[in-house]
Amino acid sequence: MRRPSSLLLVAVIFLAVSCGIPLDSSPRSIPDEELAAVTTTTTTTVVESGEKALFYYFAGDDKLLMTSREVERLTPDDVISTALTPPSEDDSELGLTTQVPEGTRLIDWHVDGSVLTIDLSEEFGIPQSPQVSKAAAQIVYSISQNLLGTGEPLRVDKYRFQIEGEDFPIVVETGQKETVTRCDFTNLLPVTEEATQTGTEPTFEPVAFAYYAGQPIDQEVGDETKAQAQQNELWNQFSVSIALTLANCSADDS
């Protein structure tokens, strides 16, 4: 099995002799000036895996629900752009829809104090006000859900929309507003106060009920959102109570 290696060695020696390269009888050092001409280049390819994040879509056109989406990185650009896209095929089959007009693109964004300004393409302003209001709610909740605690220098709680660089007020329950907060869209959450559900369904039902309550799981609300489940092993009964408190929603925000 060693014959090919021997043949290869013979071929290399033959090539060296035939090309006029002298063969030394013992090792010799290489001058520094010749070593300087030898360089080694190493190319490293870094592959970044996607991150899971929670985004909001509508169940039909009524209430906001959370679902998991994958983004390349949890940066403002990626989060805002993903918030503008339709739900995944799997989520669409479950009945989730988007109110963001088709073709809406992110042009730019910037932060001024606690206000995040989102500049969108003209498609965003084409529909009637009710759809635009729901689209704004969908975007605001998706952004606030994912940009808290990600290491980005963003601690915003107000949002201003623009279309092609021009301010675009959003119509909410209290009227037309230049800047909006999550508190302007609480009517679109499936649960806004304390809610209780009981039943005899399988164990996963209480968990699903708590998850789909639509309450953001972030630094502001996470500590104040309480879900307690008690299960009777014999009858497989459960009782879940969720007390929801929307942080920083005061009269000044309405």
Image: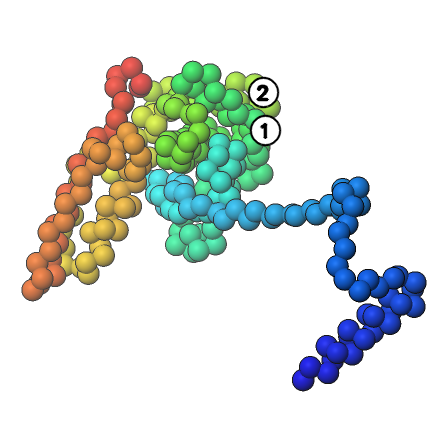
Q: Residue at x 14, y 45 (%)?
A: 228
Label 2 crowd (10 A; few <14 / some 14-19 / many >=20): some
Helix, strand or loop at label 1? It is strand
As displayed, is residue 139 above or below residue 35? above
Q: Residue at the location (92% across, 68% down)?
A: 18
Dot 1 surroundings within 10 Å: few (below 14), some, or many (20 or more)? some
The disc, 1 or 2, on the residue closer to the chain's N-terminal end is 1
In the picture of the structure, the residue carrying the numbered disc 2 is 165
Query: As shown in the figure, which amino acid type bears the numbered disc 1?
Result: Ile
The answer to whether residue 171 is left or right of residue 106 is left
State which quarter of the image contains the C terminus. Answer: top left
For label 2, the SS is loop
Foreground residue, 39 or 158?
39
Residue at the front extreme? 26
Residue 136: x percent and y percent?
44, 30
Q: What residue type is disc 2 on?
A: Gly
Image point (53%, 25%), residue name: 109
What colouring does the structure picture have?
rainbow
* Residue located 29% across and 46% down the image: 212
Q: Nearer the viewer, residue 93 or 219?
A: 219
Residue 185 location (% of width, % of height): 34, 29
For residue 158, which quarter of the picture?
A: top left
**Residue 66 on image: x %, y %:** 35, 43
Disc 1 and disc 2: Cα gap in Å? 9 Å
Q: Are marks 1 and 2 in contact (CB under 8 Å)?
A: yes
Number of numbered discs:
2
Apparent side of residue 100 relative to residue 180 in the rendered image (left or right): right
Q: Mark 1 — residue?
A: 107
Percent from the top left, x then y, of residue 213? 26, 42
